[in-house]
Amino acid sequence: MKTELQNLGNDIKTKRIENGLSQEELALVSNVERSQLSKIEKGSVNGVTFMTISRIYKSLGCDISFVKGKNSYYEIHPFVKWAGGKTQLLSTLMENVPSYFNRYYEPFVGGGALLFKIQPNDFLINDSNNDLICAFNCFKNKKDFEYLKEELIKHEANHNEEYYYKIREMDRDDNFKELPIYIRAARTIYLNKACFNGLYRVNSKGYYNVPSGKYKKVNCFDRDNFENLFVFFNKGNKEIRNEDFEQSIKDAKKGDFVYFDPPYDSFEDKDSFTSYNKETFGKNEQERLSKVFKELDKKGVYVMLSNHNTEFINNLYKDYKIEVVNAKRAINSKGTGRGYVEEVIIKNYEN
Ligand SMILES: C[S@@+](CC[C@H](N)C(=O)[O-])C[C@H]1O[C@@H](n2cnc3c(N)ncnc32)[C@H](O)[C@@H]1O
């Protein structure tokens, strides 16, 4: 039986021949080593990056959709600005994504910057933040999606300082959790756009407590992006969970790909933002995560993780490939101290 890599290789070879190109010519136009292209065509290269495969397909005049796991490619973006969002590290992360994997898992999905870039057909995303997951769930159901847009239009029209605090206080009501998910989702998205610095922060009682960003006008959503997100969430096998990260990856199997983007480990001398929910993600949690990483590694799952470049994290993952990258920090708890911080990308596979 042919492996998926062999099928991919055969597909590339067939399309190359149909285009009348030699291996040398295709290697040249797609900026890939000829020897690597030869291995890809034979299906004998593991861990070749998604970017490499997409360059080859683009050189063959094909839509990216020919790459496994994709049947369409839309520009889609996060619908919320999320602390720790990976938008500015995207090209580096994409260079490190294995081109070939079965199911995609993102247990700390946040705004989902990498998810929306990869656009896998088959995925499980998860986050412990219930308000956020309500919003993701609205993209899976036509009625909730339509109501969500109506609610957001209302929030945009009614926005002012007083209105912001009225919507913010909704979670103080005992029945808040019983409200329809589109109401809660619209609240989350509106507050995210209207609050100070796009923060999500709750107090000890679990009540959202970020002050207003004092904007005169708030745009809650980009219409085209929303329509494309709806299409994306309604194709293929897509699962959205709201539980602890460890539970969410229990079914990951050999050949699946898990990307962990946990709350950051704190720099000793910096005020890092790690309080996304009532519970903080401290050293014990980072240790628990590193054990989960190792178990997945043993199972043959491709695992990638990003975090701050701290000694603690380097020690936890010393047996793996660690690349240090510079990232511009967009949000911290005080809204000050923006600048470059060192982050690490850790993987259990070679590209
Ligand atoms: C660094 S952010 C993820 C950022 C995201 N990759 C993006 O591009 O926007 C970390 C996320 O982990 C979530 N989280 C914190 N503790 C968790 C846990 N124990 N299990 C699952 N998710 C958790 C937070 O709610 C937060 O959304």
Image (tube, helix red, strand yellow):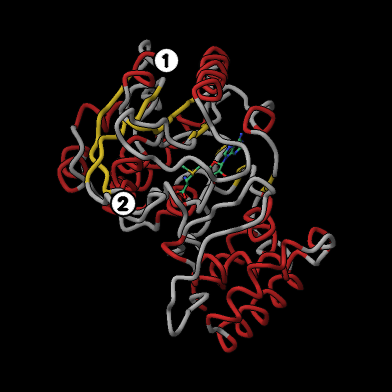
Residue 164 sits in quarter: bottom right
The local crowd at label 1, few if under 14, some if 14 to 19, many if 20 or more residues have their Cα within 10 Å, is some
Tell me the quarter of the image containing the C terminus.
Answer: top left
Q: Is residue 196 left or right of residue 325?
A: right
Q: Position of residue 161 (x, y in %)?
A: 53, 80
In the image, 297 versus 12, the foreground residue is: 297
**What residue is rendered at 32% in x and 25% in y?**
310
Res. 88 mark: 2
Q: State the separation of the CA atoms marked 1 and 2.
A: 25 Å
Q: Looking at the image, is mark 1 or mark 2 nearer the viewer?
A: 1
Q: Are marks 1 and 2 in contact (CB under 8 Å)?
A: no
Picture layout, residue 167 above or below residue 36: below
Residue 13 visible to the viewer: no
Pointer 1 or 2: first along the chain? 2
Q: Amino acid at mark 1?
A: Leu
Tell me residue 90's x, y (percent).
Answer: 34, 48
Q: Is residue 111 above or below residue 11?
A: below
Element class at badge 1: helix
Residue 155 lies, in percent from the top left, at 61, 81
Judge from the rendering whether residue 180 lies leftward or rightward of residue 326; answer left or right.
Answer: right
- The kind of secondary structure element at disc 2 is helix
Quick one: 203 or 86, which is closer to the camera?
A: 203
| Residue topped by disc 1 | 316
Q: Which x, y percent locates residue 140?
A: 69, 61
The residue under the point 36% across, 40% down is: 271
Q: Is residue 77 left or right of residue 154?
A: left
Q: Is residue 81 left or right of 350 when viewed as pictured?
A: right
Mark 1 residue CB less than 8 A from any atom of ligand 1: no
Q: Give the residue type that dot 2 points to.
A: Gln
